[in-house]
Image (spheres, coloured by chain):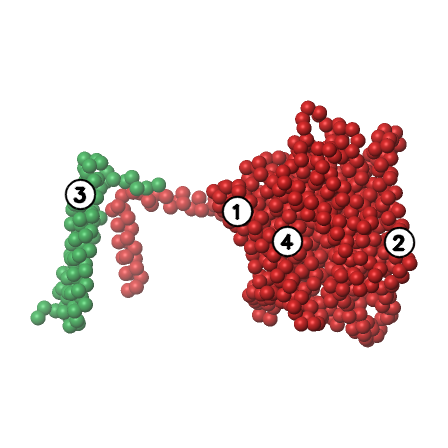
Chain colours: A green, B red
């Protein structure tokens, strides 16, 4: 049986990759994908703890996370499309209107 | 039947709400029906309550209806309750009865006004507040009514709000009344301080064994209450607002500034008669202020040319009589004069209203003259009321004024009687001056237009009120003992348990080592000297006839006489300018207040506003520092979040 620590390390690595991606990438689509990676990293740790504690709350909760992720992606992609319609680019550095 | 009492003030208030909210939509005729129906219904209910009161078992003189506990604070509970007793019943009948008649008149008088509904909204509200004032069973409820009527008076004086003089008059009435109200609430607080309660029954039954006869506390309470009364009832020194209040529509002057609201002070003093009995000094003050006002206002009334202002000064003067009666302990006479005054003064005001209405809103008497053929009904009713106010036998004013003069001499002293008699002479003079200048003599108005008698809706109230002014005196025919209906009726309210006061106060003063007074004012037996009373009646009748004759000579027989005798005399100028009281008040009180307020305003702008602006400036400076961090780049915000998380992680581990 695979130890809990391995799952958690995998989850941590994936999460860090996602965070770094969100921080450094400029393409809005890629930033979204990085957010997805972060969410799935959390899912992995949820399932791992679920298995480790012999409970089923974690599985239920990971379904919840997937639903939210799906909804978030659909809204997010819609925003990206409307961004592209306003300015023919999805480079996030071009978008800084929301300030004082 | 008594259980219906709570509806009496409620109905006009509901009428006011309906008129105010839906008046424009309903149209004038429906508003008129609602506005007049409410007071008439209240009057009928008052009659039913009166019947129920008469059916109470022998010896029961007070009936209370508590609707709910209004302000319960630990041991101190203020109830919203109505007290039905002989005094409040008399007031309720006068207020709702005269009020109904004037409401009907007002429908005719105000019909051409656009804001017809607004007028009746205020008018009904006034009636409701006045009924609360006279029906309340504690001082706070009286204060609610007191403020309510003051508020409606302000609304109605300033009814023509596009006229600057009307707005100023409203403000003046409000501010001057505020001075009196302040003293009134101080008096109520003193009462609470001494008795721990503000219910009439508790306070008045406890008063003889709580306050010492002639003590500073008793005097202070009475004086504060009386200052409150001078504000509302337009006595010296707070009378200046009432003549200006004539800027309002004439029915308002009749109902509020003659018949009901301004007599609230008399009602209050009469209601607190037990407290005043404990303070002979304040009784004297009341009597002399009342007598002084009666003469003072009458002299001003002699030289005014605005028909409504003459009546206003006459009102001030007549209320002075009522206070004179209160001050000598003749409360029945005061209430009697209050009732008859409500009848004839309401009739006089409404009569002047119909003249003003028919003369296209001309109020200067010098431009009237010879109107008696154009206004037959108004002329007759006006003449009846004028004879009543002048005190001609057998009209109502004769009996009530004569009773006051009699008590002023018997229970007071010759000075008070002299004030009353002078006032009576002046009253007869200026009232007949008014009648002669308006209805007799040669016409001085522009002959091209035709003055006309108003329609029936306005003349019927005049006839009713003139009838009451004629026969109202039957309530209290003096001399014949047992025939004085009003005296027997009000006796339970004005009965003072003087033996308890004397026992308690004597005990208390001996314990404190003070000199025990003679209690002269309390032990004084009311005398029934019939020959003296009849001869006094004769004297007052002669005085009245003298006044009328003087007016006849001055204004009918020799119209040139006033100018030749009085022209250029300093006294006339002084009286014409109303003793320049308004100017002096303006110079010594109003202007310094305005200047002081100017400095306070400057201080306010620097200190208070400065603090607020300073706080805003600090925030502004801080946001300038924080502003660069809101860059608009989403990734920057994400970075801040990550840094924050890492910081928390490091702090926790």
Is A70 above or below relative to A6?
Answer: above
Q: Is A74 located above or below residue B517 in the figure?
A: above
User: Disc 3 marks which residue?
Assistant: A27
Do the dots labelled 3 and 1 sit on one chain?
no
Residue B19, numbered circle: 1
Give coordinates of residue A14: x percent, y percent: 15, 56
* Rendered location of residue B438, percent (x, y): 75, 34
> Which quadrant of the rendered structure holds the C terminus of chain A?
top left
Q: Percent from the top left, x then y, of residue A5? A: 15, 66
Depth check, mark 3 against mark 4: the one in front is 4
Q: Is residue B355 left or right of residue B441?
A: left
For the point 81% across and 74% down, which residue is it? B503
- Between disc 4 and disc 1, the foreground one is 4
Mark 3 and mark 2 residues within 8 Å of each other at the beta carbon: no
| First along the sequence among labels 4 and 1 | 1
Q: Which numbered dot is residue B96? A: 4
At a point 17% along the width and 71% down the height, the residue shown is A55
Query: What kind of element bears circle 3?
Result: loop
Check chain identity for marks 4 and 1: say if they share one. Answer: yes
How far, Cα to Cα, is label 3 from label 4?
84 Å
The answer to whether residue B443 is left or right of residue A2 is right
Q: Which mark is residue B536?
A: 2
Among numbered discs 2 and 4, the one appearing first in the sequence: 4
Q: Secondary structure at mark 2?
A: helix
> Crowdedness of circle 2 by 10 Å Cα count: few (<14), some, many (20+)?
some
Frontmost residue, B295 versus B552:
B552
Q: Is residue B147 visible?
A: no
């Amino acid at each position: 049986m695979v130890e809990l620590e391995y799952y958690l390390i995998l989850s941590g690595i994936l999460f860090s990759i996602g965070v770094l991606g969100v921080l450094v990438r400029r393409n809005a689509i890629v930033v979204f994908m990085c957010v997805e990676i972060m969410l799935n990293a959390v899912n992995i740790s949820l399932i791992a703890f679920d298995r480790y504690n012999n409970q089923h709350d974690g599985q239920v909760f990971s379904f919840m996370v997937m639903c939210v992720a799906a909804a978030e992606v659909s809204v997010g992609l819609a925003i990206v499309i409307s961004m592209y319609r306003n300015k023919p680019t999805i480079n996030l550095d071009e978008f800084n209107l929301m300030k004082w | 039947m008594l259980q219906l009492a709570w509806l009496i003030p409620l109905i006009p208030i509901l009428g006011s709400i309906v008129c105010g909210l839906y008046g424009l939509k309903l149209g004038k005729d429906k508003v008129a029906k609602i506005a007049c129906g409410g007071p008439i219904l209240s009057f009928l209910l008052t009659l039913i309550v009166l019947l129920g009161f008469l059916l109470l078992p022998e010896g029961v003189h007070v009936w209370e209806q508590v609707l709910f506990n209004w302000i319960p604070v630990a041991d101190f509970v203020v109830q919203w309750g109505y007290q039905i007793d002989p005094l409040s019943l008399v007031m309720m009948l006068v207020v709702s009865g005269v009020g109904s008649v004037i409401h009907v008149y007002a429908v005719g008088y105000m019909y051409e006004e656009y804001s017809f509904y607004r007028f009746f909204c205020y008018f009904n509200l006034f009636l409701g507040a006045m009924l609360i004032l006279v029906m309340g069973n504690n001082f706070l409820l009286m204060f609610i009514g007191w403020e309510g009527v003051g508020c409606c008076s302000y609304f109605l004086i300033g009814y023509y709000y596009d006229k600057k003089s009307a707005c100023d008059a409203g403000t003046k009435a409000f501010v001057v009344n505020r001075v009196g109200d302040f003293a009134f609430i101080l008096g109520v607080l003193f009462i609470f301080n001494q008795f721990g309660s503000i219910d009439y029954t508790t306070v008045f039954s406890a008063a003889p064994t709580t306050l010492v006869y002639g003590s500073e506390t008793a005097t202070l309470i009475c004086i504060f209450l009386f200052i409150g009364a001078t504000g509302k009832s337009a006595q010296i020194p707070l009378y200046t607002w009432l003549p200006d209040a004539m800027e309002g529509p004439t029915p308002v002057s009749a109902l509020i500034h003659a018949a009901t609201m301004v007599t609230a002070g008399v009602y209050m003093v009469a209601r607190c008669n037990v407290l005043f009995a404990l303070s002979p000094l304040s009784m004297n003050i009341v009597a002399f202020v009342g007598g002084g006002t009666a003469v003072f206002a009458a002299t001003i009334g002699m030289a005014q040319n605005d028909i409504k202002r003459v009546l206003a000064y006459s009102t001030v003067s007549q209320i002075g009589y009522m206070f004179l009666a209160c001050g000598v302990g003749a409360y029945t006479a005061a209430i009697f004069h209050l009732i008859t005054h409500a009848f004839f003064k309401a009739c006089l005001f409404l009569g002047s209203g119909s003249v003003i209405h028919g003369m296209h809103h001309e109020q200067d008497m010098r431009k009237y003259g010879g109107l008696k053929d154009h206004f037959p009904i108004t002329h007759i009713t006006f003449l009846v009321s004028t004879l009543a106010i002048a005190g001609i036998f057998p009209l109502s004013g004769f009996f009530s004024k004569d009773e006051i003069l009699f008590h002023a001499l018997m229970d007071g002293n010759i000075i008070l009687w002299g004030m009353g008699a002078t006032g009576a002479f002046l009253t007869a003079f200026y009232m007949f001056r008014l009648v002669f200048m308006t209805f007799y003599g040669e016409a001085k108005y522009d002959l091209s237009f035709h003055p006309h008698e108003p329609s029936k809706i306005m003349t019927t109230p005049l006839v009713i009120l003139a009838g009451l002014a004629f026969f109202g005196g039957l309530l209290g025919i003096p001399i014949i003992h047992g025939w004085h209906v009003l005296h027997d009726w009000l006796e339970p309210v004005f009965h003072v348990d003087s033996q308890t006061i004397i026992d308690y106060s004597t005990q208390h003063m001996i314990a404190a080592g003070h000199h025990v007074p003679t209690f002269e004012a309390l032990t004084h037996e009311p005398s029934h000297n019939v020959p003296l009373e009849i001869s006094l009646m004769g004297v007052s009748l002669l005085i009245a006839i003298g006044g009328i004759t003087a007016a006849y000579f001055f204004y009918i027989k020799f119209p040139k006489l006033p100018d030749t005798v009085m022209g250029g005399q300093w006294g006339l100028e002084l009286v014409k300018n109303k003793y320049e009281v308004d100017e002096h008040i303006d110079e010594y009180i109003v202007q310094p207040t305005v200047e002081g307020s100017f400095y306070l305003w400057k201080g306010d702008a620097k200190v208070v506003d400065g603090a607020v602006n300073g706080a805003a400036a600090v925030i502004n400076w801080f946001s300038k520092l924080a502003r660069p961090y809101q860059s608009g780049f989403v990734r920057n915000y994400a970075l801040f979040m990550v840094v924050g998380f890492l910081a928390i992680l490091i702090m926790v581990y």
